[in-house]
Image (tube, rainbow, N blue to C red):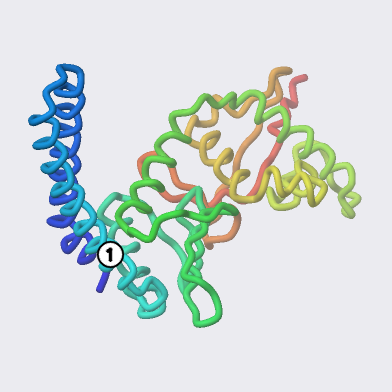
Amino acid sequence: MNYEELISQLTPVQKAIKDAAAAAARQQKALQKNEDLGNIPEMKKAMAALEDTVSALQAGLQEAEKLVSGFDTQEYFISGDFTRQLLESCEAKGVDVQGEKGVYQMFPYKIRVVADEEHAAEVWMDRKKVNSVRPSQIAETIRAGRAKLYSANFNVENFMGDLAEAYETARLRSDSKNTRDGTTIALAKIYKYLAPTARARKDYDAQAFAFDLARAYEKGPDAWVTKDGKRFDLGTSRNGSGYRVLSSTGVENYISTLRHIVNTEE
């Protein structure tokens, strides 16, 4: 059984629970009203009706509990049905997926599906456990999160300023004696100076860096300028190396290098 099948079985039970709960609320109001009026016969009728309704409500809850307890989440994961449905849901929602064997890049998120005999079936989004086993809901969370990130304010000038400082540090500390201003430097090397410690990389990991690169790249060359007027070029790779980024419209690029465009007339 997959989760959608469980929902189809729970739907009529949930309706019965909802109807019973609504009836109980009406009967409680009737009881309260007749209590205020001092109408004991009607109070007794309301209490009898409420008792029957509570019994129906308990029966519905017991049936729901039976269905939920009988759902084998671990088998759902181990069988591969969960992962297959998650990938199908992502495709239906336009979420790009890369990866295999339980580890997927759903830019800008990293999704990990744990499904084995020794561990509880789990889904992790980056470093946070996802409290859902419904593939369509998780795919929607990813889609909505991505849309929110892209719509958030992003100061590309500040980002380029930080990138420029890390570029300069990488250039000056390069082993090559011929590394002059304007030299093309790998972004992977620049990132090491942008987040030089394990703590810094935890707060600002490579995936977050790739997302910022994607937003800067999407703004175009005119935005790749620092506050003090230094202009840079973000170089792409044709062989799939570098940081894989997606635009807000799903266009894929691999950004691999940064170069300070030196004005020779200065």
The answer to which image quadrant residue 213 occupies is top right
In what quadrant of the picture does the N terminus appear? bottom left
Q: Which residue is drawn at 60% across and 29% down?
A: 224
Q: Judge by depth and name the residue closer to the eye, 34 or 16.
A: 34
Q: Where is residue 159 in the image (x, y as percent from the top left)?
A: 65, 30
Q: For mark 1, does the 10 Å Cα neighbourhood hold few (<14), some (14 to 19), or many (20 or more) residues?
A: many
Is 34 situated above or below 196? above
In what quadrant of the picture does the C terminus appear? top right
Q: Residue furthest bottom?
A: 117
Q: Where is residue 97 in the image (x, y as percent from the top left)?
A: 40, 59
Residue flagged by tag 1: what amino acid is it? Tyr
Q: Which residue is labeled 1 in the image?
A: 3
Q: Where is residue 17 in the image (x, y as percent from the top left)?
A: 18, 49
Q: Which residue is drawn at 91% across and 50% down?
A: 177
Label 1 residue SS: helix
Is residue 244 shown left or right of residue 261?
Answer: left
Count all numbered tags in the image, as a single digit. 1
Is residue 251 shown left or right of residue 224?
Answer: left
Is 167 situated above or below 17? above
Q: Residue at x 16, y 42 (%)?
A: 50
Q: Judge by depth and name the residue closer to the eye, 235 or 73.
A: 73
The answer to which image quadrant residue 6 occupies is bottom left
Is residue 158 shown left or right of residue 118?
Answer: right
Q: Judge by depth and name the residue closer to the eye, 152 or 256.
A: 152
Q: Position of residue 233 (x, y in %)?
A: 62, 37
Q: Residue at x 16, y 55 (%)?
A: 11
